[in-house]
Amino acid sequence: MTGLDNSSRPVELSAVKARVRMMVGREALRRTLCRGVLVLLAGASATACSYITPASDDSGPATNTEDTITSGSDDNEAAVTTTTVALPDPTWQRLELDLVPLAQLDQPVAFSSRSGSNNYYVAEKTGRVRNIERTVTEEGQERRVTLSGTPVLDLSETVSSGEEQGLLGLTFSSDGRLLYVTYTDLDGSLVIAEYLVSRNDQADTESRRELLRIAQPRPNHNGGAIAFGEDGFLYIGVGDGGGSGDPEGNGQNLDSLLGKILRIDPFPDGSRPYTVPDGNPFAQGGGRAEIWAWGVRNPWKIAFDPLVGDLWVADVGQNTTEEINFLGARGPSAGGFGANLGWNLMEGFLPFEAGQEPEDHTPPLHAYDHEEGRCSVTGGVVYRGELIPLLNGVYLFGDFCTGEIFGLEIKSEGTVVRRLSISSAPEQLVSFGAGPDGELLVLERSGPDGTGTVYRVEPKEPAEE
C-alpha cells in the first residue's frame, strides 16, 4: 500500500483520544446533539432536541406538532421531554422546481467543475470522465450545452465497475491544472490518482501519478468521494470495506484507512507521493496519520460549503437509518478534526446491534429511516447559485431509491428539513453537483443498461394562461 509509515513515531492512543475529546468538548458535543434529529421523513415525530420541525410528506407546509424529544446524557441513557416549539415553514419549501436535462451518459456517478472553465465534468462509473461543454456569453448567459465526444480521461480498461465499484469520484486542483480521480482497479483496490489536464480538456495519461492505494476486502462500501477543502488539502471518503455490520470493525480501527475521512496534502515530498498535514489528529502517532475523522460506513458523497467551508458527509446506513453529518468549519473541532461519527457502534442516533455509544461520538445532524421505499442517502451540496435565491445556504440531498430531494437548513432556532417540490423525481438519484456558477446539478441513473441523465435544477416556469 502506498502511504506513510508512522511506526517510528508511536504515541499512546489514549493520549490522542484525550486530546480529541478535549478539542471537541463535552458542551460542544451536547450542542451538537441538540442540533441533531431522527426524522421520519414520511411525517412522523422527530427524535432529538428542541426546535426541530417534523418533515411533512408532501410539498405543502407542515403543521406544528408536539414532538417527543430525546437528549443524550453522560450515562448514555435517554432523557425524554417534550416541546411545542416549532420553526416557521421555510419559504424555500414552497418553491416549484424543474429538472432540465442537459446530457445523457453511461452511469454518471460523480460531478465536478473546473477553475477557469464554464464546462461540467462528470465521472461515468464504467471509467470515463466526460466533459459537457457550455458556451456562455460575456454577460454569463448560456447559449449552448453539448456533450463532448472525446472523454477527458478513459480508464475503462483499468477499472472494475461491478456492484459498487467503478470510477467513483473526481475533483480538480484550485488552479484547474490537475485532475484527481478515485476508482477501484482490477484487483478491487481503491486508487487515488492525479493527471495533468490541458486547456482543451484532455488528461495526459503519461503524467499519471498514484497517490494512494487502499485494499478493499469486498466489492461494496468503497466510498470514493473526494473534495478539496478551503485549507487546500484533499479530503477522501473511504467506506468500511464492505460486508454486513463492518465485520472487521474497520470504522473504529484507527490503524485502518477503511471507514474514514482522510485528509492529505496531494503534493509529493521527495520519495513520498503525498504528505500528511501537521494538523491531522494522528499526525504524531496513535493512528494512521492520514485520518481526519472516522466511524463511517459508506460515505456516499462529501461536500464543502464553498462560502464558509463547512464539511457535509452523507453516510449510507445498514438496515434502518441514513444520516447526514455536519462538520462545521468553526469551533473547537473545526472541520471535523478527530470526529468519531460512530459506525459500527452507532447507526444514526442509536446504538447498532450490541454497540455502545463511544464517549467521543459526534452524532449526525440529521437522520431518516427507510419508510415509503427510501433506502440509501445520496449526499448533496450547499446551494450558492443565483437562479434560486431562496435556497442560498440550504444543503440539498436526496434518496437513491425514491429520487426525493430534500433541503436542510441550520437556523439559529434549530434545523429544518423538508422535501422539495420537483417536477419529476429522478429514477435513481446518484449524485449532486454545483457548476462553476454555483447552480445545482443532479445525476440520475435509469433503465437496466445504466443510462443516466445530467439535469440542472431551475425554477419552474409559470404555466401560460
Image (tube, rainbow, N blue to C red):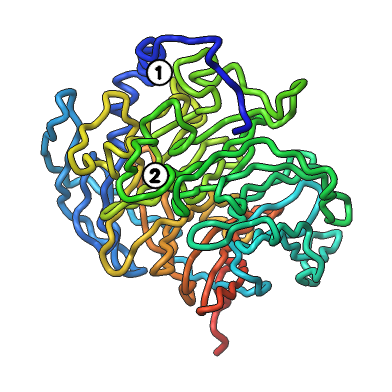
Res 144 → quadrant = bottom right
Numbered circles on residues, count: 2
| Amino acid type shown at disc 2 | Arg
Q: Which mark is residue 8?
A: none
Residue 47 is situated, as x and y percent measured from the top left of the image, at 21, 46
Taking 463 as reference, is 121 left or right?
Answer: right
Dot 1 crowding, Cα within 10 Å, few <14, some 14–19, many 20+: many
Q: Which residue is pictured at 44% across the width and 26% down the height?
A: 255
Q: Which residue is pictured at 49% across the width and 19% down the height?
A: 281
Q: Which mark is residue 297?
A: 2
Taking 307 as reference, is 291 left or right?
Answer: left
Of labels 1 and 2, the one closer to you: 2
Taking 199 as reference, is 442 left or right?
Answer: left
Spatial separation of the CA atoms under disc 1 and disc 2? 21 Å
In this orientation, which residue lies closer to the viewer: 239 or 394? 239
Residue on which disc 1 sits: 20
Residue 439 is situated, as x and y percent measured from the top left of the image, at 63, 58
| Amino acid type shown at disc 1 | Val
| Residue 271 appears anywhere in the view | yes
Q: Which residue is pictured at 63% across the width and 71% down the height?
A: 106
Residue 51 is situated, as x and y percent measured from the top left of the image, at 27, 43
Residue 326 is situated, as x and y percent measured from the top left of the image, at 43, 39
Please tell me whether mark 1 sits on a helix, a strand or a loop: helix
Query: Which quadrant, please, contains the N terminus?
Result: top right
Taking 452 as reference, is 244 left or right?
Answer: left
